Image: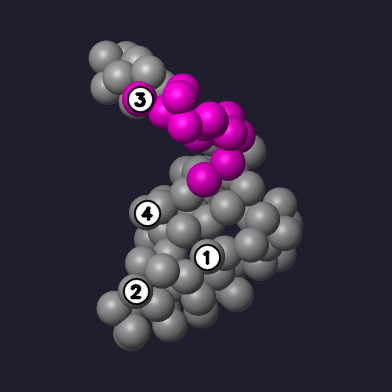
């Protein structure tokens, strides 16, 4: 798994070419890519359009304790 640092996601418009290269490299190595620091739906949509299928950040979920993960997932599935 390769991770795209939040600094590139924060400056997504100026980092698109770099993100495309990371996604291409990962694809050629049969690796997945996760983008960190997704804070808006616009960032999420743009990353999806570029082919990045995994992400983390406050837009998707807050940091969770071990005890809160299962209730969060249950609420997400019900929602």
Going from N to C along the chain, the mark reached first, 1 or 4, is 1
Residue located beneath label 4 in the image? 53
Q: Position of residue 11 (x, y in %)?
A: 72, 57
- Judged from the image, the secondary structure of the residue bearing numbered disc 4 is loop
Outermost residue toward the front in this view: 67
The vertical placement of 7 against 20, above or below, is above
Q: Residue at x 45, y 24 (%)?
A: 67
Q: Nearer the viewer, mark 1 or mark 4?
A: 1
Question: Residue 9, percent across and down?
Answer: 64, 55
Q: In the rendered structure, are the residues bearing label 2 and label 3 in contact, judged by CB atoms less than 8 Å apart?
A: no
Query: Circle 1 sits on which residue?
Result: 3
Q: Which residues are magenta?
A: 56-70
Ranked by sequence position, the earlier of labels 4 and 3 is 4
Task: Say whether marks 4 and 2 touch (CB < 8 Å).
Answer: no
Give the CA distance from mark 4 to mark 2. Answer: 12 Å
The answer to which image quadrant residue 19 occupies is bottom right
Disc 2 target residue: 31
Residue 75 tag number: none
- Vertical side of 5 occupied by 48: above or below: above
Res. 21 in view: yes
Q: Which residue is mark 3?
A: 70
Sequence order check, earlier mark of 1 and 2 = 1
- Mark 2 vs mark 3: give the one in front: 3
Q: Residues within 10 Å of mark 3 (few under 14, many from 20)?
A: few
The relative height of residue 32 versus residue 67 in the rendered view (above or below) is below
Look at 36% across and 67% down and name the residue there. Answer: 32
Q: Main secondary structure of the magenta part?
A: loop
């Amino acid at each position: 798994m390769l991770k795209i640092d939040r600094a590139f996601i924060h400056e997504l418009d100026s980092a698109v070419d770099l993100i495309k290269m990371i996604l291409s490299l990962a694809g050629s190595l049969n690796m997945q890519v996760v983008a960190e620091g997704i804070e808006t739906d616009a960032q999420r949509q743009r990353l999806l359009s570029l082919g990045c299928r995994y992400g983390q950040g406050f837009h998707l979920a807050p940091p969770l304790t071990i005890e809160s993960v299962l209730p969060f997932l249950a609420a997400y599935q019900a929602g």
